[in-house]
Image (spheres, rainbow, N blue to C red):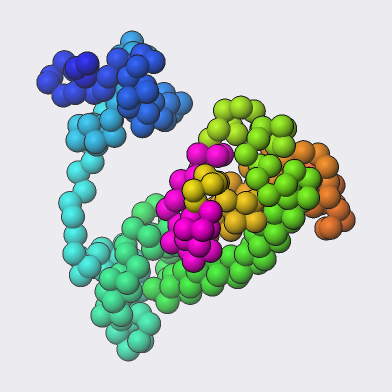
Amino acid sequence: MAPLSRGDGISVGYPLTPNTLAAHPDERDTRRHIATRQYPVYGKELLQSACFPPEQLLADSSFIRRGCPMKFTKPATTYEDQADILFERGLALRENSADNSREEIILRLRDVGYYRLSGYWYPFMRDGKFTEGVTFAMIWRRYTFDRQLRFHVLDAIERVEIFLRDSLAMELAQQSGPFGYQYPQNVPDMNDNEHAQFLGKCLKDFHRSKELFATHFKNTYGDSHVFPPIWVIVEMLEFGSLVSLYQGSSRVVRDNIASNLEIPSSILLSWLRTLNDVRNICAHHSR
C-alpha cells in the first residue's frame, strides 16, 4: 500500500487500517502522539486518516501551533561561539577565576553540552539576559548538585528494587510454583493483553540476556522449558515490569509483600509507581 502524500510530494504515512497498523506499529504511536497534542499541521481530515513518520515531520521543519507558522532558524554553533553567547547575555566573565574563565566554560560545554546546561541557567535569566552577578560557577554548582542527587536517589531506589525482585520471586513461587507466572489465573489483575505483553517482554529479555545464570538455564533446561523460573526472570526485568507484575499479582501476593513493610498494598503500589517515574528520570540524567 502506497503512503499518503501531503500534496507536495512528501509522504506522510499510511492509511489508518488494521492491516497497516499491524505492519507499521510505530506509526500508530506517532499518530497518537501528534493527535493528543493537537498539532494541526496537515489539517484535521488528514490527521484522522493518516499516520505521520517522525522523520517527515522533522524534514518539513514548519509546524503550525495555534495557527502561527514557526520555522527553526538558529544556526549550529561551536563551543567557542556558545561561550560568547553566554557572555553576550550577561554572564559574568572573570578571567582570574579558574571556574569562570572563558577557557573553563568551553571545557564544561564540551563535557556536558550547551543544551543540557541551559536548563540549569534558565532560572538565573530574566527577559533573555542573566541577572547581574551570575557566574558560570553558580550554574555549574547547580548542575553538579543535581547529578549527585540522582546518584543518591538511584542508590536508594536500588534497595527497593532488589527487595521487590526477591519478594515477588518468593511469593509467586510459593503461591503458584516456579513457572506459575506464565498462566493468567496466577496474575489475576492482569488482563489477557497485559499478560501476553508481559510474557513477550520476559521472553525477549531472557533470550537477550548474556548473564551466566540465564545462559546456564538455556543450555541446561532449554529443551524442556521456554521460560525460566520466576526467580530467574525477575533478575532480568526492568523496574517498570516488576511494578506491573506486582500490580497484576493476586491480592494475597501483594498484601504479603506489603506487610513486610507494614503498609497497605495500595500504598506500596502507589509508591512503586512514583519510584519508577523517579528512577527513569535519574537513569536518563534528566533534571
Magenta stretch: helix, strand or loop mostly: helix
29 magenta-colored: no
Q: Is residue 70 visible?
A: no
The residue range painted magenta reads 198-221
Residue drawn where x is 36% and y is 14% of the image? 17
Dividing the picture into quadrants, the one containing residue 8 is top left
Residue 96 percent coordinates (x, y)? 32, 89
Residue drawn where x is 73% and y is 50% of the image? 173
The front one of 16 and 71 is 16
| Vertical position of residue 261 compared to residue 93: above or below | above
216 magenta-colored: yes
Dividing the picture into quadrants, the one containing residue 54 is top left
Relative placement, left or right, of 47 versus 37 is left
Residue 267 percent coordinates (x, y)? 79, 46
Residue drawn where x is 54% and y is 47% of the image? 224
| Vertical position of residue 236 compared to residue 177: above or below | below
